[in-house]
Image: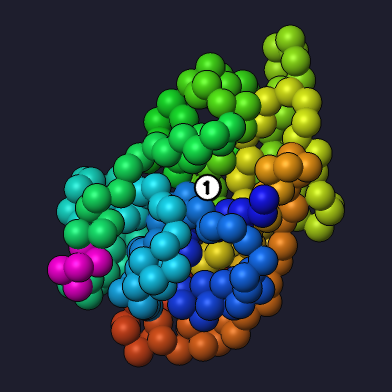
Amino acid sequence: MLYAIVSDIHANLAAFEAVLDDIGDSVERTWCLGDLVGYGPDPNECVDLARQRDIICVVGNHDKACLGGLDLIEFNPDARRACRWTMEQLTPENWTFLDNLSEKIVLAEFTLVHGSPRAPVWEYITQPEAAYENMAAFDTRVCLVGHTHVPLAFYLPESARACERRWLSGVGPLDLNAGRWILNPGSVGQPRDGDPAASYMILDDDAMTVEVHRVPYPVEKTQQRMEQAGLPGNLILRLSFGW
Ligand code: ZN
């Protein structure tokens, strides 16, 4: 069966809608690796969509912070400002939805977390060394992570003692049939790999392959909404460049 993996939507409704349109009804279910909110102008609309579509979600650091569940001192000033703004916007229903999300979900051969299996809310996996250390922190063959906003794969061949890192965007389907994997689908709402197009991944659990898809969306629509909301200029600008 096919599954769509999305992550780091960050209240970017135009990007989220474009990705959900691209997915259409081609998949059995959509999984989200956290950070539905934070940074962007439409937190309630994005949480509403996730709830309506029955998307399986884990919690991200921004989701937690926007509920007051994390010390904002860990955030840079722009993220902190966006977080405080989000906190004021969330409806009680959406607050409760985010508050009830788990840090880790295991579905058959797949572990879902936001950051890393050993530190689900905070750790960024960008380097093969950190990926290797994290291989001991989950029991399934594949772990799905978000948080860095960069589509990447880390591969541990059987009986190897180091991970290989592979770029996932623009390379076609990746075969997962051997070894163990940590996979990141990139970000829907704030890509950081130099490509402003929204990023998500399709998983085929019969063939055991994944493929990253990029979806251009009307960036300026989100930027206008951010300006209206008075969100920080750097957060508005970065969406044009994908950083
Ligand atoms: Zn994020």
- Mark 1 C-beta closer than 8 Å to ligand 1: yes
Relative placement, left or right, of 7 versus 159 is left
79 vs 203: above or below:
below
Q: List the residue tagged with mark 1.
A: 146
Local packing at callout 1 (Cα closer than 10 Å; few below 14, some 14-19, many 20+) is: many
Q: Say whether residue 92 is magenta.
A: yes
Can you give x and y, in whole percent of width and height, for residue 70 in the image?
Answer: 23, 46
Which sits in the foreground, 152 or 46? 46
To which quarter of the image does residue 74 belong? top left
Which sits in the foreground, 39 or 212? 212
- Which region is colored magenta? 91-95
* Element class at badge 1: loop
Can you give x and y, in whole percent of width and height, for residue 120 in the image?
Answer: 40, 36
**Residue 186 seen from this side:** no
Residue at x 55% of width, y 87% of height: 220
Q: Say whether residue 15 is magenta.
A: no
Quarter of the image containing the C terminus? bottom right
Can you give x and y, in whole percent of width and height, for residue 187 in the image?
Answer: 56, 59
Residue at x 40% of width, y 31% of height: 119
Q: Amino acid at mark 1?
A: Gly
Relative placement, left or right, of 25 versus 90 is right
Residue at x 35% of width, y 89% of height: 228
Can you give x and y, in whole percent of width and height, for residue 113 in the image?
Answer: 45, 40
